[in-house]
Amino acid sequence: MIHYDIDGDGDQDIVICYQYGATMENVDPDGGKIHWLENPGDVQLEWKKRYIGKSTAMHRLAVGHFTQEKVVEIIGLPIVERPHDIHSIVSINLWRRPENVQEATEWP
């Protein structure tokens, strides 16, 4: 989990990955989901959960500008690539914030 002002409104939002699986060996192939929780800026209001993407066994996240300087990106590092395979090389994933981030169903 990491915090960052995803929507640019001045409030710190939360980016979180979850649903890894039971162990490194037995990861959930449908897991590794990444959402951002939109901070409403008021303690009386509920945070909105918004989908970014997924990658099996997603484990570490960073937010910043990794390939360019205009649009925020999220880089994700899974702990393993697939179930029952702890020795394969893992993919590094990069999601770029879409222009209308509140309406996006998934980030490219």
Image (cartoon, grey):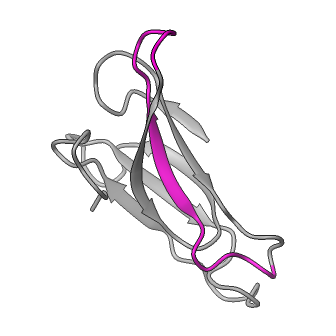
* Residue for point 73% across, 90% down: 85
Q: Percent x, y for residue 99?
A: 16, 44
* Residue for point 53% across, 61% down: 33
Q: Percent x, y for residue 1?
A: 61, 42
Q: In this view, does 64 lie to the left or right of 33?
A: left
* Residue for point 52% across, 76% down: 91
Give the vertical position of 58 relative to 101 (above or below).
below
Give the vertical position of 86 relative to 91 (above or below).
below
* Residue for point 67% across, 89% down: 88
Q: Percent x, y for residue 39?
A: 43, 23
| Residue segment shown in magenta | 25-45
The quadrant of the rendering that contains the C terminus is bottom left
Q: Percent x, y for residue 45?
A: 45, 16
**Number of residue marks:** 0
Give the vertical position of 93 relative to 47 (above or below).
below
Residue toward you, 101 or 93:
101
Does the magenta segment cover residue 27? yes
Does the magenta segment cover residue 104? no
Give the vertical position of 108 relative to 72 (above or below).
below
Residue toward you, 105 or 78:
105
Magenta span dominant secondary structure: loop
Direction left: furthest residue: 99
